[in-house]
Image: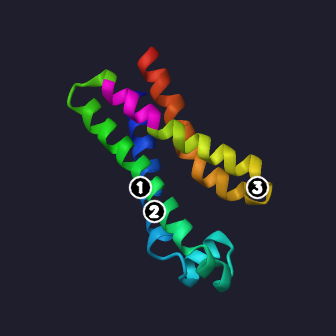
Amino acid sequence: MVIVGLVLASLAALLHVFIFWLESFAWTSPRARATFGTSEADAQATREMAYNQGFYNLFLAILVAVGVVFFATGATAPGAALVFAGVGSMTAAALVLLLSSPDKAAAAVKQGTLPALGIVALAIGLLI
């Protein structure tokens, strides 16, 4: 179950790298605007904010990736702590999105499902 948790956490990290790319480099593109439901004018007006927010997603992904590497190389406790911090923050951010913008529930579910499942699987694996 530990491996399942680490795989789910890694997939969540990859998703957040993709979100980083959308927010930081493709924010004004038609694909990013369609993904986030923004108009061209709104995308231009929020470009700097999205660029910064994208890096938050990248840093969470890096936190998870470093944790997985630590875990895989035998540093189980620090690895698990880093993975839990990363996927926990991803899950919390998805919950904030859901509660603050119910119209973005689909995005919150997409953003939060993998990290939440990673938390559950890794916790079960470590407890067994």
Q: Which residues are magenta?
A: 78-85
Residue 82: image quadrant is top left
**Disc 2 to disc 3: CB gap under 8 Å:** no
Are there few (<14), some (14-19), or many (20+) residues within 10 Å of tag 3?
few
**Disc 1 to disc 3: CB gap under 8 Å:** no
What residue is pinned by disc 3? Answer: 101
Are there few (<14), some (14-19), or many (20+) residues within 10 Å of tag 2?
many
Determine which of the numbered discs, if any, sits on residue 124 in the image: none
Residue located at (64% from left, 70% from top): 36
Q: Say whether residue 84 is magenta.
A: yes
Residue 81, position in %: x, y? 39, 27
Secondary structure mostly taken by the magenta-highlighted segment of the chain:
helix
What residue is pinned by disc 1? Answer: 58
Element under disc 1: helix
What residue is pinned by disc 2? Answer: 20
Element under disc 2: helix
Q: Amino acid at mark 1?
A: Leu
Residue 91, position in %: x, y? 58, 41
| Whole-number angstrom distance, CA of label 1 to CA of label 3 | 22 Å
Nearest the eye: 116 or 52: 52
Residue 38, position in %: x, y? 67, 76
Residue 80, position in %: x, y? 37, 28
Q: Is residue 101 above or below residue 121?
A: below
Q: From the image, which quarter does the C terminus lie in? A: top left
